[in-house]
Image: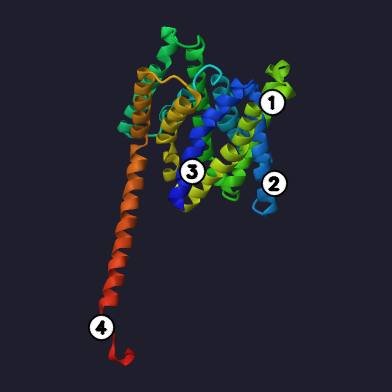
Amino acid sequence: MIMLGYAIMCLIFSTTFLAIKVGVDAGMPPFWSAGVRFFVAGLILMVIMRLCGKTSFSVLLRKESLWIGASMTFVTFAALYWAEQYVTSGVGALLSATGPAMVLLIRALVLKVNVPRLAFVGAFIGLGGVGLLMLPGLSGTVHGLWMLACAVVIIGEIGYASGAVYSKQVSSNMTDVSPIAQNAAQLMHGGWMLLLLSLLTERGQIHVGAMLEPQALGSLLYLIIVGSMGGHTLFYWLVSRTNPVFPSTWLYISPVLALLIGWALYGEPMSWMVAVGAGIVLCGVLLTNFESLQTLWKGKQSRVVHRTRRSLEREQRLEQPIPAKSR
């Protein structure tokens, strides 16, 4: 069940980038659709958790929820939704995979935390891959705003990384709150901020008729129900059943799937430069998280050895002669 849940989560996260692209291309204002998606998904999750007695709406009044929602949802997805007007969903997914590198750089440069040299190398390799992904905009072979859109996604990932670092710093203050309730509060805060941004910048673009078009409405419903509620709930379920590192390895799988899905289902261009850039970005992400992955692998091996030892002991007990009194 754990591996099935992991596979479904990776597939969900890889398809959300294309769903965003479909909705934006169908005429859905990017900030409006993002705001509706996250606020509605967060509200539904919060109501479910409240009915189950797992949380109360007072979690919304905590400053930690507000700041995490502002950075990890508002900044990150305002950037991604806007950028996907001008870049492909696959490139958006690959650029979003740079989040761990941004976390490492913030911890090292701002918080002065010692980080492994290999992780630093991985972060800069990943940024080199980002440069390759931006080159089609420089050559003029794609939309003129390609490079700007790529840069905006990277800025959004800096917002995500800031929120991730902050959430780790204040996690001791949130031990009484369920992770799913924390996620719901984060989504709601990010959602209302995105809706406010939409009302300030997209007032003339919000048309009910356009939002009821099959592609736009289907994209929005998919992102609310499957993407935000299903994918994130699976993520936290996997964290509770395994550890925080294992579910996060979707970052090595979903961007590649997103690139292939966008090419196969939506006809997005796949150039050699994008393919090489994708490989470099993922290598950088892998090196950035190499130490955590190594710890995860060693833990997995020790669990396998422990299970094997227990199996051998059980077999040895079964092979022992039955005492005469029991025959």
Q: Of the two numbered discs 3 and 4 on the same chain, state the one appearing first in sequence.
A: 3
Residue under the image location 66 percent in, 36 percent down: 188
Which mark is in front, 3 or 2? 3
| Residue that badge 3 annotates | 8
Q: CA distance from mark 3 to mark 2?
A: 24 Å
Residue under label 2: 47
Q: Which kind of residue does numbered mark 3 sit on?
A: Ile
Q: Quadrant of residue 60?
A: top right
Q: Amino acid at mark 1?
A: Met
> Residue furthest toward the bottom?
325
Question: Looking at the rendering, in which quadrant would you find the C terminus?
Answer: bottom left
Viewer-side residue, 230 vs 80: 230
Q: Secondary structure at mark 1?
A: helix
Mark toward the start of the polypeptide (3 vs 1): 3
The residue at which mark 4 appears reads as: 321
Q: Are marks 3 and 2 in contact (CB under 8 Å)?
A: no
The image quarter in which residue 218 lies: top right
Q: Earlier in the sequence, mark 4 or mark 2?
A: 2
Q: Residues within 10 Å of mark 2 (few under 14, many from 20)?
A: some
**Residue count near mark 4 (Cα–Cα under 10 Å), binned few <14, some 14–19, many ≥20:** few
Amino acid type assigned to the residue bearing label 2 in the image: Val
* Nearest the eye: 256 or 167: 256
- The answer to whether residue 325 is visible is yes
Residue visible at 29% across and 64% down in the picture: 309
Q: Position of residue 201 (x, y in %)?
A: 68, 17
Observer-side mark, 4 or 1, equals 1
Do the numbered discs 3 and 1 sit on residues whose CB atoms are within 8 Å? no
